[in-house]
Each structure stands twice: as structure tokens, then as C-alpha cells.
Amino acid sequence: MLKSTFLKRLKLALSSFGITWLLAMALPALAALTLAATSVVSDGALTLTGVAASTWDVGGLLSLQTATNGAITTGTGLLTTGGALTVTSTTTSATYATASVGSSSSSPAALSSASAGHIVIAAGQTTVNASTTAVTANSSIFVTVEQVTPIAGTTCYTTFIPTSTPVVSGLTVSGANSGFQVKVANAPTGTPLCLAFRILN
């Protein structure tokens, strides 16, 4: 009886000559409501408003805007996904951020799971090893020389060495021991060569 009354009043509130009625005036407050397969059709704007955190659990695939292909707009809040996000067309963003940025002046540089960050090749050395679980067999690793670094207390080697372009010379894919090695032909002197890296998988 409650289901039938609710649906009749909801239909009236949404489509009775374009007039929106307040459901709160027609229905008592409900802690929970269970419906069978249901369609809600509105002749005008449809607004759902809650005053607390809410959950949509549809028990399967949730499809949005599949009929009209209209845009989906969110507010300025954070959109979080617990799994992979797949986009089949162009992605545009003002900025891109990684979940974590790892920085270390040691070798090996322990970077946890960072997919971007800052490392150094120590003075007198030509290689640095970095460990991060972000590395996979399909990783593309990009390395750039920096003249300044956010690594605390580190002054970078700034003398230009034409033959010392850093290259990724090694890759290890082994769970918690995954990582990569960066090598230069000529060792920096006096101060370390500072590097920024980012990993794309």
C-alpha cells in the first residue's frame, strides 16, 4: 500500500501540469524505501537533494545520459573512484596530479608507490637506483634534469654537460622490489645532479 501511494504522489509531484509539489508535504519521513523495477519520468527539471552523505548502490552497471548524451556536470567537490577510470574520448584538465610524489637524495632512492618525483645522482657517481611499485613491465619513464629541486637541503649541480643526458638504463619489475636505474655518461662534481621523473603505465 505504501509503495502504491508513494508512486502516485511522486508522479503527481513531477508531472502534474508542470507544477512541482513538495513531497515532504505529501509523505511522512521515511528511513528506507524499497521498490521493485521502477521508472521515474519528469516533464521538467528533476532535483534530488539530501542533507547528508548519500549512497547509490544499483547492484550492477550504472548508466548515465545514454539516451540524450547530454553533458554531466559536477560541482567543485572531489570525484573519487575506487577502481580504474576508462575514457574512450579526449580528456581535458587544467592540471594533472599524481596520488603521491616521492623524493629522495639517497641511492637507492626508496619512493614507495610514487609515479612521479625527484631523485639525484650523487657527486662523483654516474647512476642512481630508484625503487617504486609504480613500475611495471609496460612503464614509460621520463627523466628531466633540474637546476633546483624540492628535496630539502640539496643544492643541484648546474654545470652543463652535453654528453650527460640522463637515460633509463635499467628496469626491475618484482613487486615491492620494482624500480629503475638512471645513468649519465659523466659524473657531476661537487654537488649532485638533480632529476625529476614521471612514470606512465
Image: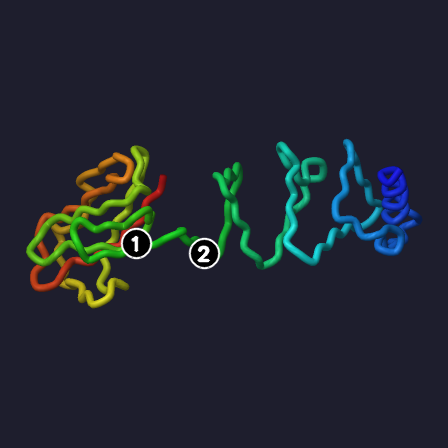
Spot occupied by residue 47 in the image (x, y as percentages of width and height)? 76, 52
Q: Which residue is mark 1?
A: 102
Q: Which residue is mark 2?
A: 95
Q: Amino acid at mark 1?
A: Gly
Question: Is residue 165 shown above or below 190?
Answer: above
Question: Is residue 161 shown above or below 174?
Answer: below
> Who comes first in sequence, dot 2 or dot 1?
2
Q: Residue at x 37, y 53 (%)?
A: 100
Q: Nearer the viewer, residue 146 or 154?
A: 154
Q: Amino acid at mark 2?
A: Thr
Q: How is colour applied across the structure in the image?
A: rainbow
Q: Quadrant of the C terminus?
A: top left
In the image, which disc is placed on residue 198? Answer: none
Question: Is residue 144 shown above or below 1?
Answer: below
Residue neighbourhood size for the residue with mark 2, other residues' Cα within 10 Å, grouped as few (<14), some (14–19), many (≥20): few
Report whether 1 appears left or right of 146.
Answer: right
Residue neighbourhood size for the residue with mark 1, other residues' Cα within 10 Å, grouped as few (<14), some (14–19), many (≥20): some
